[in-house]
Structures are given as C-alpha cells and as structure tokens.
Image (tube, rainbow, N blue to C red):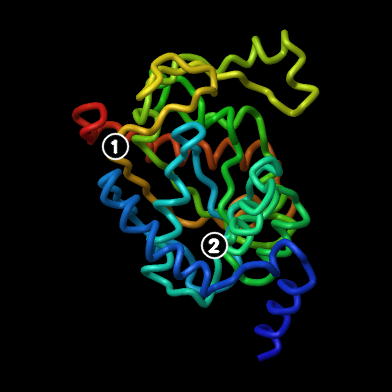
Amino acid sequence: MREINDMASNRSDNPEVAKWDPEFTRRITNWVGPVARRYFRAEVRGLASIPQAGGALVVSNHTGGMFTPDVLIFAPAFYDKFGFDRPVHTLAHYGVFLGNVGDWLRRAGAIEASRENAAAALGSGAVVLVFPGGDYDAYRPTLTENVIDFNGRTGYVRTAIETGVPIVPMVSIGGQETQLFLARGDSIARLLGLTRARMEILPLSIGFPFGLSMIFPPNLPLPAKVVMRVLEPIDVVAEFGTDPDIDAVDLHVRAVMQAALDELAAERRFPLLG
C-alpha cells in the first residue's frame, strides 16, 4: 500500500504527469486504435516483454515524419493488453503542446520532454515511451529506413540509471514508407539559422497529395504496413555495474535494436505492402 501511495504522490507532484486522464485516454484509444491498426495493418509484437509493474523506459526508433504512427499504434496495443491502471507517457517536443491540442495530448499521456518529467512518470510506476532520435530519426531518408540512429543522444540512458528502471528497447518498421523521405535537410537548417529556434532539420519528401514537400504542405501518410516489436528489458546496473559507461550502454541498446530491426527488414518483401 505504501508503494502505491508513493507512486500516486510522485504523479500528483508533477503537473505534467498529473494531467493524465485514464477515462479520456480510454475514449481516445477506443476510437484511434482500431483506425490506426486497420489503416497501417499494424502489428505490435512482444508486449509481454514489458514488466507487469513498476516504471519502465521504452526506447524506440521514430518513424513517419510529421504524421508518425508510432504512438497511435503502440499505446492502444499496450492498453489492450494491460488495461488503463498504468499510463503510457510519451515524451514529446514542447512545440506540439500549443493551444487546446496540448491539453488533449497531456490528458492522453503525452508529457513535455525533460529529465524531470520522465523521472516523475517513471517514479509513479508508469511506462514512459521515448524516441531519442526525435525528428532527426523520424525524417531519416527512406533509403536508410532500417538504420538505428539517435544522432548521438544518450540522455535516455542517464534517465534509466537515475530512476533505477529497465530500458525496454522497441523497434518499428514501415513508417518511412508512408511517403518517400529524400533528405533531412539538416545542413539547410544550419545554413538558414533555424537551429537557433531549435529546428535542426528542414526535411524534403515526396508524398500524397502535394508531391514535393519541405515540411509544408504536409503530405498524408500512405497506408504502409507497420510492424513494431518490443524486446527484452535491459537491466543497466545488472549488465553494466553500478557505475556504467553511458556510451557503452547506448551502444549496446542500439546494437540490440539494430539486430531486431534487421530481422524485421528481412521479413519485409515489398515496400508499403510489407
């Protein structure tokens, strides 16, 4: 009982985490989940690998650009299996929380990406979903869609160590086929000085219905088949000791994910169709 009270206290003490509304999440999930599952013919494998209780940091590659399907596919599958007693909190860029949309996203479990928010959510016993590569990863060129690349970001490892939770790797394939991603445009973003506004990329893609796009106008995602696979948890301290090397842990996580993504890629026979 004390552990449950401690988790509830951690959740209520953090304004971001406390906004999660399980009933609102249930309604959204019951509507969005079937649509996303059918549209992308989605599969989520290995959900049993997620610990049944306690905080867990799910670390995934990011796919699909602006209209990424990752959360829309993973969260409903998680709730279908585990119910709504424990939330999935997704770390998201502050820019997505503007206006009323931000309130809805927070009620559905999204929280602004920060170490403090992640620690509060994990301390409450929640599952936290993080995409270390962010937009850099979600807009990777389609020709390199099956490469795990976090752009050198290792903060997720520190978060897992500091909160004492396992890292649960997850991989996703198919999102980079929802349109043809040509280039991230990171050099163009630097040239235009967009990095000062925290815009590190200016991606170029071809899709439907607008054809060539540099973020805008935003093309709609094609119904590519998306498969996600949850891998076995990694206990950082058990595997790397009480004072682990951050880069070594990150290298191991990415290697495990790359091997799993290679296996999914080997199964995939045709673009879009899966």
Height in image: 64 above or below 179?
below
Q: Amino acid at mark 1?
A: Pro
Tag 2 secondary structure: strand
Q: Quadrant of residue 74?
A: bottom left
Residue 171 location in percent, x, y?
A: 42, 43
- Which residue is labeled 2 in the image? 88
Residue 91 location in percent, x, y?
A: 63, 50
Residue at left 39%, top 57%?
32
Q: Residue furthest bottom?
A: 1
Nearer to us in this view, 217 or 143: 217
Mark 1 or 2, which is nearer the eye? 1
Q: Is residue 15 left or right of residue 212?
A: right
Height in image: 188 above or below 154?
above
Tag 1 secondary structure: loop
Q: Is residue 172 left or right of residue 10?
A: left
Give me the disc on residue 223: 1
Q: Is residue 6 left or right of residue 28?
A: right
